[in-house]
Amino acid sequence: MYKVRLWSVKHARGMERFYNAINPAIVGTLKLKNRLFGTRFDGAVTALEAKGKALFFDCKMCGNCVLSSTGMSCPMNCPKTIRNGPCGGVRENGHCEVKPEMRCVWVAAWDGASRMEKGDAIRSVQFAVDNRSKGQSSWLRLARDE
Amino acid sequence: MSDGHTQFEDYGSNPGDPLPMLPDHVSHGRFERVLRARHFAITTEIAPPDSADPDEVLRRAALFDGHVDAINATDGSGANCHMSSLAVCAILTRVGYSPIIQISCRDRNRIAVQGDVLGAAALGVCSVLCLSGDDVSVGDHPEAKPVFDLDSVSLLSTIRTLRDENRFLSGRPLDHAPRLFMGASINPFAPPLANRVHQFAKQVAAGAQFVQSQYCFDIAMARDFMARSRDLGLTEQCHVLMGVGVLASAKTAKWLRSAIPGVHIPDAIIRRLEQAERPKAEGRAIAIELMQQLAEIEGISGVHLMAYKQEEWIGEIVTQSGVLKGRKPWAAPHPLIPGAPSPATVN
């Protein structure tokens, strides 16, 4: 939801803290799940992640989540899905050139990053998404990779 | 003509042959030579024709003979369909021009882009400008599918992978890497103003060696941006060419400002055009003044002139500005197409 998404960016620091606090628990639980049940419940985990992130970030489940490097503003909401933005077409009021009613996702991102403890992560270059990961859970990937 | 200039002019019996690559250069191109020699450089844009006639490209390019160091061939600018940038560049390199191919991420995925980059280098293109591209919704085919597989920064790192690591993104090795001087676009005049310099830093980190800006009509903002860029050491790693527009009238200026997001034109400029007896001449005078002021700012390596539908004035604007300090950019050695002005008559 657009309004909640804006709220999340405004409270990027709180979001960052909350995520850092719950991240070990999520990853730990999923690792345990993987050990006990293998890939069972993967669908439910993915659905839960999609619902939660959709509520707070209008998540598009790109499967390449970089929210902590984009000021808690999901770059997949940019009409051009730019991962290193913004583009040159930002309006004087900070809104999107393609969707004038929407605040530029990347104006929001730089704003959110400035509120975060590790906001400087926005300055590192992000490569394009791996399209094979679309619709997959970033949490499950974290639990498998770590 | 001093020795400092002749190195940009040398070519063999065929002006379309690649120039010898100089030490520490990444391309065979004249544009890279001019910038690395610390000359103030001029680039401009060619409007690709709505036509399959190559002579039309040469006719349009001839207007710039002896006045610019490189010509950007736009890639479906404004999301409107025209002759492809790659084809325009190939027509131009055959006869010795120094084009900059523009690659927009809107229309091609990473497979097509990498193929085009190799093809462009094979056809003698030495410089590339990486762009995200205007959205399809603003162009003449709004029903088209936007691609945006990459963005301009990942496009830069993709080309750098091809060039410096001698491989495709997949890892498959290349037999011969594309020798390309890499560029990107900046817009220091649109929000988020405070962070535009950090985004510039990301482009440099991804491989940008030159950047061309959106229209600059606000010298104070340009100065501020350049000061921040110098502080981050960016101007030592990347050549900045500021965009200068030639406005035909106050009406055009107002239209640009309201219809093209990201274009910032101060009211003072619009008032000047409104009050002028000859608005077109005033538009050119404004461009000349901006060029002169930009040339004075530390860290600015050149200007990118955008004179859509006023291309015939480029020569006069460049000459009157005096920013080249007497240096004369490359001109085609002889009339390339029947009826085109030869370099001798252009001036």
Image (cartoon, coloured by chain):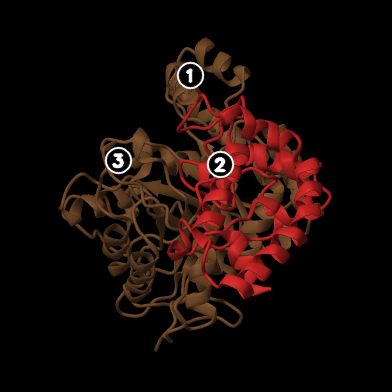
Subunit ID for the residue under disc 3 = B
Q: Are marks 2 and 1 in contact (CB under 8 Å)?
A: no
Callout 1 crowding tier (Cα within 10 Å): few <14, some 14–19, many ≥20 = some
Q: What's the residue type where badge 2 is placed?
A: Ala
Q: Position of residue B57 (x, y in %)?
A: 25, 52
Out of A56 and B246, give the one closest to the viewer.
A56
Query: Which chain gets the red colouring?
Result: A
Q: Which residue is mark 2?
A: A54
Residue A108 visible in image: yes
Relative placement, left or right, of A28 versus B323 is: right
Out of B270 and B3, give the one closest to the viewer.
B270
Q: Residue at x 81, y 53 (%)?
A: A21
- First along the sequence among labels 3 and 1: 3
Q: Residue at x 56, y 53 (%)?
A: A83
Q: What's the residue type where badge 3 is placed?
A: Asn
Q: What's the colour of chain B in the image?
A: brown
Relative placement, left or right, of B47 versus B148 is: left
**Dot 2: element:** helix
